[in-house]
Image (cartoon, helix red, strand yellow):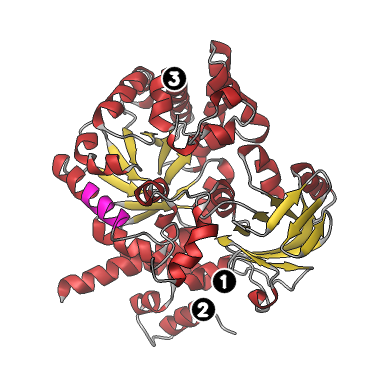
Amino acid sequence: MTSPIVAAVQAAERGEMKQAEAVLSVAPDDVEDLLHAQMAGDSPAHAVAHGVAASPGAASGRVCLTADAVLDAEDEGTLAVFVRPFTTPADEAAMSAAAAIITAKGGMASHAAVIARGWGIPAVVGVETLAVDDVAGVAQLGEAELREGELITVDGSQGAIMLGACEVGRAETPDELFKLLGWADELRGGRLAVRANADDVRSARLALEFGATGVGLCRTEHMFLGERLPLLQRAITDGGRAALVALADAQTEELAGLLEVMDGFPVTVRLLDPPLHEFLPDHPELAEENPMLGVRGARLGVLRPELYRAQAAAVAEAAARRVAAGGDPWVQVMVPLVVGGPELAHVRAAVAGELAGAESRLGGRAIPVGAMIETPRAALAAAEIAADADFLSVGTNDLTQMTFGFSRDDIEAKIMGPYIDHGLLEANPFEMLDTAGVGRLLADAVAAARAARPGIEIGVCGEHGGDPASIAFLAGAGVDHVSCSPHRVPAARLAAAQAIAARAVAGAA
């Protein structure tokens, strides 16, 4: 069966429609379908369990209940499905090697979901009927008992799990897709740019292949995963000079590679925002009753300014090395989870020396410092924050969580289905931007920031930046760019073009 994308491009090439008409005739979901392997049959019909469809695509493999089991399967050349109660940064070496991921807890913005989408790995999270006993080597999935090594199939597009190895098709990306996306970029005319969330060289390369024009969010805590996780843990718990130097050296190395890949494109480096329960689970003295609202982001920078200073020095050094190598780095530093202008100014002052010290090595170019708008208070105080920011980026994952009072790790599996079934919510707000509440905060924040500081660059770096319906709203809100997981960039490029075209038509009417 011919893809709608192939049919539209061929029709345009035959002169049966204009290129712009071809762009408008294709649904962004058709782009998603081409980029991910799909089930050959109707998977939900014989699924033994369902959960949140956290990352699209489908895969079969053997059940692996521990990270070591996944890595052993990789060594043997066997596809593995990583099955866990939940995932943490310590699991990411295994996650990157897995063919698919299943977790008992979590939602669209949980650790497992965000990492899986970034790497293009099918994932189903928030499977309430799943219980994992990795000591006994068995997992209970509803009435079915899964033993390590048994075959299982995951449909991340439908949120379905099947026993055994089901037939899975292959992902195919025809040349017509990239031709259509090129036409979409022309139709967009440089407005509403599409960047990618990328934390390493691999993700950055993939983002460029899919047509991203920069990195809108580089989460520096994600540079300290697997073997590097102890570096971050020591820097936070010890804080001595040796620990901070090791942290900065590792970040400099990683950023230098990322800036090389993204040479000439903007790269927004977010300072540390590590939820302590995820990154330091073995340090009970740092445990918090509500860690997602605890010592995170700018709060960590206020309490431990030496951490942010070490990071700023690493950013400056990586950029300077790139310049010395003949490159053209466009790096900027972003302070996460701010709640007001004085807080941003305080953190900015703490890192200013490290950033300014590199200007001579950067040809006199200053490194911009901006803020993430991801708390309701920050959205309401956007004008105040803009006064001390060179740019703003709205983090819609946390803004949604805090505006609704919904835990992004827990709410989707338990509450979302009944709320949608009863008509209490039109859609999952972690998947599609809630325009009445979160969207209103966002739009008002954009307007207030621009009134206070005309021309300030404002982007969106939550996963809503890859959702077509959300992109249509964001175009109307006047943001300059969206940023999403690399695998969502192609669909976002198409959706952005369609949103800009729709606004042009509405304006002409």
Quadrant for the C terminus in the image: bottom left
In the rendering, at what x and y percent does residue 161 appear? Answer: 68, 66
Magenta residues (range):
437-445
Say which residue label 3 marks.
304
Give how far across and how far down residue 391 sits, in percent. 29, 39
- Circles 2 and 1: CB distance less than 8 Å? yes
| Residue at horizontal 61 percent and vertical 38 percent from the top | 89
What's the CA distance linking mark 2 and mark 3? 54 Å
The amino acid pointed to by label 3 is: Arg
- Disc 2 is placed on an element classified as helix
Q: In the shown orientation, is residue 285 left or right of residue 350?
A: right
The answer to whether residue 282 is above or below residue 121 is above
Q: Which residue is mark 2?
A: 6
Q: Judge by depth and name the residue closer to the eye, 19 or 483.
A: 483
Q: Position of residue 442 (x, y in %)?
A: 28, 51
Q: Look at discs 1 and 3 and give the one toward the viewer.
A: 3
- Residue located beneath label 1 in the image: 174
| Label 3 residue SS | loop
